[in-house]
Amino acid sequence: MKKFYSFILLAAIAAGAMADDFTTDGTGNVYTFDSLSQIEGTGVTLQDDGSYLVSADFTIAEGDALQLVNNDVIKMANGVQITINGNADFAPADTAVVTRDAEDSNPKGFWMLGENGNANLKNVTFEYVGIVFGGVNSSLHADNCTFTMHNGKSSSTGAIAFNASCDNNIIENCYFIENTVNAIGCGATNPVGIIIRDNIFWHNTTSNRNKPQINMTCAGDYDMYIVGNQVIGGQFTLSGGIGVSNMMGLGHTGTLYIEDNYIADNRYGITTIGSVDAVIKNNTMIDNCYETNPSNGGSCVSIYDSSSSSNIYMEGNWMEGGLWGITVPTGAPNINLGKIGDPAAEDYNPGNNTFVNNGNSGVLYDLFNNGTATIWAQGNTWNVDEQTEEKIEEVIYHQVDDPSKGLVIFMPAHQEGTAVDEINAAQPHDGLYYNLMGVPTEAPAHGGIYIHNGQKILVK
């Protein structure tokens, strides 16, 4: 009997050894799915239709690289995870597709965890699979890729999820469409330096979780740019547009720039939480109002900072159709919505923010200051028929309404012949579109406020 049990034990050990995932040797080789299909034990096989089936986990070792070849079609089986500790060269000349192998399969996707392994993604469509990136000394660059219907099995943080702090990341010209979780995200203790520009986000977080489509942490020395994107919600009651936070109170010297974005049909438009230094400029926010309880959200912009250490600069934003315009739930952050006294001053801000039909329960709320700090908000266009102090007071909640709250200094408001209207008069009737900085273009690349033939127009 002892020999019989010893035989069973040895057999189990041998089976376990045979079941180990395949790992490359780390000698600097570049692997393709075709070359892996010719190596026994990788779990990669060439199918009759020319696609490659990945039926088992495998690992690309540090120093090696995995490459997608032009026109590759990769099908991943249920639960399969590909770990890349080296480089990911996913930049075919024209196209490649990574998808699931069957309708009931939920692959875990790619885990790019090499401390010195970069990820270059271009011209690739990722269906039902996502990417977790953790390259501490590395960077991820995604260009002209599509991420759609990510199943959330690799991470609930995003179709692209950062699980380590890193810098010099770029995500541009990509499409994020109907992913189960949010599109891009990172952990609360893992701030990243990143440029997110000229992407289209469409109906992400289809599971209707309490997460924005872009969900980032801003801290450390990293600058973050979220610029020129379209962030279109699916009218979900829990999913917001853009959220950037510092919930752990991490120290920071970097700045967040949220500029020139078109944000519509989300639970809320933009929110910052915790100590954040931000420039929020020239964004167009329309109908970000799908929170079912106004006490819980629905703002075009919400600035939540109980630490009272944020510095927020807002200029040239169009805010329309929210349950609230701008809300400051608590604390005393330094908020500059317009300070026009001295054009030479360091804190000069022409304002040029516009509020249209933001309110709930039959009451208009352009700016709700529930915090204790004074807010400068001069040079803006408020949702009243005349830009007078008496009428603007009706759409602002502040110290006048509750002595314990901070004061909002909103006069002078925007008037004809100043700010935007001066730009109007300066532009020729040449058919071009001019943004609020006076830069011309033949056609707007995204929504916002433009001057066209001497007239201010809203491009949705």
Image: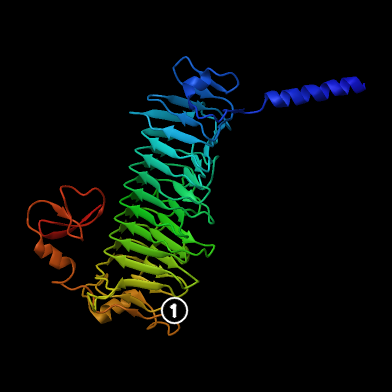
Q: Is residue 157 above or below residue 423?
A: above
Q: Point out the residue furthest to the left here.
A: 429
At x 50%, y 71%, the residue is 306
At x 57%, y 23%, the residue is 43
The residue to which callout 1 is attached is: 372
Residue 184 in sight from this viewpoint: yes
The image shows residue 372 at horizontal and vertical percentages of: 44, 79
Judge by depth and name the residue closer to the eye, 254 or 442. Answer: 254
The amino acid marked with disc number 1 is: Thr
How many numbered discs? 1
Q: Is residue 378 above or below residue 297?
A: below
Judge by depth and name the residue closer to the eye, 7 or 146. Answer: 7
Q: Is residue 27 above or below residue 162?
A: above
Judge by depth and name the residue closer to the eye, 239 or 19. Answer: 19
Task: Identify the secondary structure beneath mark 1.
Answer: loop
At x 33%, y 72%, the residue is 336
Q: Is residue 318 above or below residue 367?
A: above
The image shows residue 153 at horizontal and vertical percentages of: 55, 39
Quadrant of the rendered image containing residue 140: top left
Judge by depth and name the residue closer to the eye, 181 or 384. Answer: 181
The image shows residue 184 at horizontal and vertical percentages of: 44, 47
Q: Is residue 34 left or right of residue 382?
A: right
